[in-house]
Image (cartoon, rainbow, N blue to C red):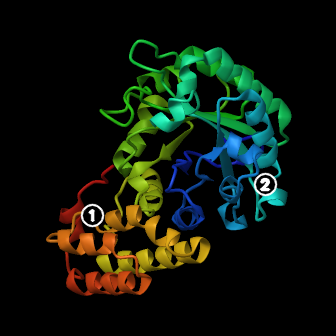
Amino acid sequence: MKIGNIDLGEKPVLLAPMEDVTDASFRLICKEFGADVVYTEFVPSDGLVRDAVKAIAKMKTFPEESPVGIQIYGHNPESMVEAARMADHADEIAGGHGCDFVDINFGCPVSKIAGRGAGSGMMREPDKMVAITKAVVEAVRKPVTVKTRLGWDENSKIIVELAERLQDCGIAALTVHGRTRSQMYRGEADWTLIGKIKENPRMHIPIIGNGDINSPENASEAFRLYGVDGIMVGRASFGRPWIFRDIKHYLQTGERLPEMPVSERVALAKRHFALSLELKGEPRGVFEMRRHLSCYFKGLPDFKDTRIRLLTTTDPSEITSILDEIALRWSDTPLETATGVYGI
């Protein structure tokens, strides 16, 4: 599979862009465990145009992350075009590596984004979505990709026809989450329409499937049943960045790797935490690690009180001490039965 001239090999596994999750510290860890592509958090086009410090900071990436996409969102065509140009030159504007491609967020379902007509809110205005996509493709040097959903609701699943129109704008790849905006993250993802896109003889760009990829087994099934070119892992990566390694091993061998021991999880969590503090500082580096720390040890017995302590303290040294306690107390816990398959 290729995104423009970027060769990702066969059956690549990508880390989904997620707000307050896919910061540089997490992206770097996921790359270490085999994520073929990573994406920034959502970068607001209006914020970039206003030169908002936080929006610009989100565009800073590192060479070790490559290939990395900067994902932008918005509902104003002019702002989206200008934001795309800025993302295209992120190395000059934000420093660091910049991006290898620009991704357009037409998939986020949260009200503060979709309710303003951005993200998956654009599914109610497909003509505008297509116009923005075409304008962005024409405005930048790097490949442009799109991430979207099946439609706005159960009665407007327009993705099969829309995929053709987006392809005709010149995008290099399309990622489809198998839910409507109205579903948010509820219920099971429906991959049947993703498969229909792949069956369309007019489609020639890579199609990446997203939604409920939470184990090596269902990752393999997604490729086998729906013929997608790549798969994207989202919430199942929280506090479990090694899922990329596990999926790729299963795809190659048909066998599961043993669960990562508690001692190794503690060591990884400590390294992830230190990187978060280094890149974000206090207290932000503490707060943004909580989502991951709550999942690194999911399934451990009698863990509730320890989890509460881990997620309520703001003292980095105390968090490190709690992690050391976890390594001592649960060192012999058989995680194969404690965690089962990957949760989302």
Q: How many marks?
A: 2
Contact between labelled residues 2 and 1, with CB atoms less than 8 Å apart: no
Residue identifier under label 1: 298
Residue identifier under label 2: 90
**In front: 248, or 276?**
276
309 relative to 17, above or below: below
In the image, residue 130 lies at what x, y percent?
Answer: 69, 21
336 relative to 144, above or below: below
Q: In the rendered image, which quarter is residue 225 located in?
A: top left
**In front: 149, or 287?**
287
**In front: 301, or 276?**
276
Labels 1 and 2: the sequence-earlier one: 2
Q: Residue at x 32, y 71 (%)?
A: 312
Q: In the rendered image, which quarter is residue 90 located in?
A: bottom right
Q: In the rendered image, which quarter is residue 281 located in?
A: bottom right
In the image, residue 159 lies at what x, y percent?
Answer: 53, 20
Marks 1 and 2: which is nearer the front?
2
Q: Residue at x 22, y 80 (%)?
A: 330
Going by the numbered disc 1, the residue's amino acid type is Lys
Q: Which residue is situated farthest in the left direction here?
A: 302
Going by the numbered disc 2, the residue's amino acid type is Ala
Label 2 CA crowd tier, 10 Å (few <14, some 14–19, many 20+): many
Label 1 CA crowd tier, 10 Å (few <14, some 14–19, many 20+): some
Q: Is 256 on the left or on the right of 233, as rendered?
A: left
In the image, residue 338 lies at what x, y percent?
Answer: 19, 64
Q: Residue at x 84, y 34 (%)?
A: 139
- Residue 175 can be seen in this image: no
